[in-house]
Image: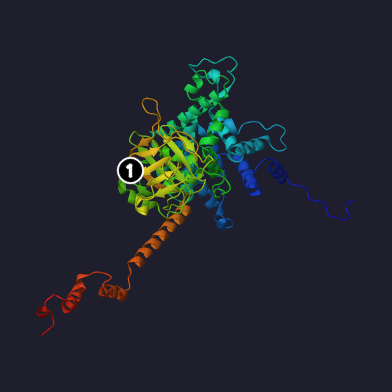
Amino acid sequence: VSYGLPAKPELTKAESDIKYLGSRYPFGDDELWKLYKAFYRVQNSDEKVSFISDWAVQCVEIPDSHSNGEDSKEILEELKKERLRTMQVVEHKILPPEFSQRLQETTFSNPAYGSQCEPGLETFFSGLSNVDRRGGRCTIGVLFDYFSVKKNSIPETSSAAGTSAIQVADFNEILHLAYRLSVAAAFLESAKQGIDGKTWIPPQSLDEKAIEGFSHSLTDFIKRKRIRDSPYGTVAEDPYLDKGFVEKVDLQEWVELNAPVLASSLSTFMFHVFFPDKPFPQTRTALSFPRLLQDSVFFTEATSPLLFSFACLSNSLGGSWHRLYSSSSDGLSYNRLQNALLGYGGPSLMIIEETCGTIFGAFTGSRWKESKDFYGQADCFLYQLIPITAIYRPSGNGRNFMYCNSEARSRGYDGQAHGIGFGGDVHSPRLFITETFENCVASSHDLTFECGPLLPKTASGGLQKTFDIETLEVWGVGGDEVVGQALGARHQQREITAANIRKARKVDKAAFLDDFQSGLIESKAFAHRGQMRGRADEDTGDDKYKVGDN
C-alpha cells in the first residue's frame, strides 16, 4: 500500500554503481564520484601514456573559480598538459622505469568475481583500496607482491622439500622502491604548491648505508624470531635469507615494529596521484619526506636515504626540520648545546656519529628544561641507524625519559651526573652526553626503554658502552607549524631569562649609596670619611698628639 506517497525514483546506473562501491570500499561519496568519472575518462581516452600518468591526468579537475567560465575547457586542457609533464619527470627520473606497468599487473588486474558493476571498475577500486585505504599491513603486502617470486625460481639456491611454492621477495628492492616512492610524493607535493621540484630528483648513485641498516635489521629480526620459535633454540642456514629474500609475514611484522611509516611511502604517493587537488587527510599517516631548513653534515642531499630512514621510524620525523645545534658549526660546546635546547617546546631529534662511524641517538617530543630530575613523556625513543637500524621505545617499566642537568646548576654539590641523558638514572643515564663531550655513555639496557645495543660490539665480541663524539646535531622536527611554535616557546623562555637577569642587576641607587656610606659595603670611594673620623677620635696614648686639639 503506497498511501498516496510518490514512488522513489529509480537510481541511474552511475548512482547504483556508486551505492554498491560505497558499501564495499573505504572511500567517501565525493571520492567515489571523482574516481568513478576518472575511470571512464581513462577508459575512453585515445591518448594513453602509462597507467599512472593516465590516471594522474584524468584526475585533474578545473578549480571552482573557473568551472563556469568561457575558457574553462582551455584551462582544463592546460592543467592536464602540465600534470602530464610533471608525471613524466616522476616516471623517468625518480621511479623505476617499469613501475607503472608492474603495479598495474600485480595490483589492478585481479578479476573481481560476482561484481554488480563493470568488472574492470571493481578491480580498480579493489586495487586502490589495498594500496591506499586498508592499513599499513595491506600496503606492505602490495609492495611484497610487486616483487614476489617463488623460491624455486631464485637462481643459485636449493629449494628445500615442500617450499618451492612459497612466495618471497627481495627486501632490498622493496626498500629502494619505497624510498623512490617517498621522493616522488615529495616532488608531487612541491608541484602542487608551485615550487620547483628539481631538488627532489635523486642522484644516480645513492648512499646505501641507510638501506643496508634496514636490511641488516630485518635479517637479524627474522633470525631471532626463528630461534625463539625453534624447539631447539637453533636454526639452519637459509640461502634465501642470505640473499635478501623474505616472506610476506616476516616483512609485515618487522615493519610494524621497526619502521611503521614505511608502508605509507606507497599510499602517500598514490594519494597525490589520484587526489591532486586535496591535502593529505590528517586522520591518516603520511610519509612526509623530511625537508631541511639548514645545512647538515649527515645529509648532503635533499633526497638523502638517511632522511628516508628517519621518516620511516615515526610520523613525527616528517616535514620540515630546523637545526638547533651542530657541532660542525657551533663547536663541541656544552654551553651552546644546552642554550640551543633549553625552552625549545617541540619534538627534537638528536643525531650522534661516534668516531667509528656508528650513527645513533634519541627522539623526544617534550620541552627541554634544566632539572636535577628526569622528565618527559612516553613519546620518545632511542635508536641506532647505522650499521644496523634498531628502535627502542619505552618499555613501560620506568619514566626516566630525558635529563638535562649542568654542573653550574648545583655547582656540583648534587652528586649527580652532569650533562644530557636519556634513560637510566641520575647517576648513570643510559645514553649520556657529558659536559666535556668525552667518555660519553651508550649502554644497552635500562628500565625505561627496550633493551638493545646503541653501539656495535667490540672487536672481541663484547658490548661497547663508551664513545667519543665525531659529529653531533640536534634538529627540531615535526613540520613548519610545530617547529614554529616550538621556536616561539624557546624565544619566550629566553626573554624571561634575560628579563630576570636584568632585574637581578638592577639595584636601587639610593640604597646602594646608603650601604656604601654606612659601611655595609666597603669602598675606597668613602674610605677617607672613616679615616677622618678615626683620626679625630683616636687615642694615641699621648694627649699632645691628639688630632684636633689645637
Asked which secondary structure carries label 1, the reply is loop
Percent coordinates x, y for residue 402 in the rendering: 45, 46
At 16% across and 79% down in the image, what residue appears?
A: 536
Q: Pointer 1: residues within 10 angstroms few (<14), some, or many (20+)?
A: some
Percent coordinates x, y for residue 273 in the rendering: 54, 43
Depth order, front residue of 193/241: 241
The residue singled out by tag 1 in the image is 437
Report the amino acid beneath label 1. Phe
Depth order, front residue of 104/263: 263
Depth order, front residue of 523/483: 523
Q: What colour scheme was applied to this rendering of the protein?
A: rainbow
Depth order, front residue of 284/105: 284
Height in image: 487 above or below 106? below
| Residue 382 in view (yes/no) | yes
Height in image: 485 above or below 506? above
Q: Quadrant of the C terminus?
A: bottom left
Percent coordinates x, y for residue 467 in the rendering: 35, 36
Horizontal relation, residue 536 to residue 437: left or right:
left
At 88% across and 52% down in the image, what residue appears?
A: 2
At 69% across and 40% down in the image, what residue appears?
A: 24
The picture quadrant where one finds residue 210 is top left
Horizontal relation, residue 538 to residue 460: left or right:
left
Percent coordinates x, y for residue 152 in the rendering: 55, 17
| Residue 196 in view (yes/no) | no
Q: How many labels were placed on the picture?
A: 1
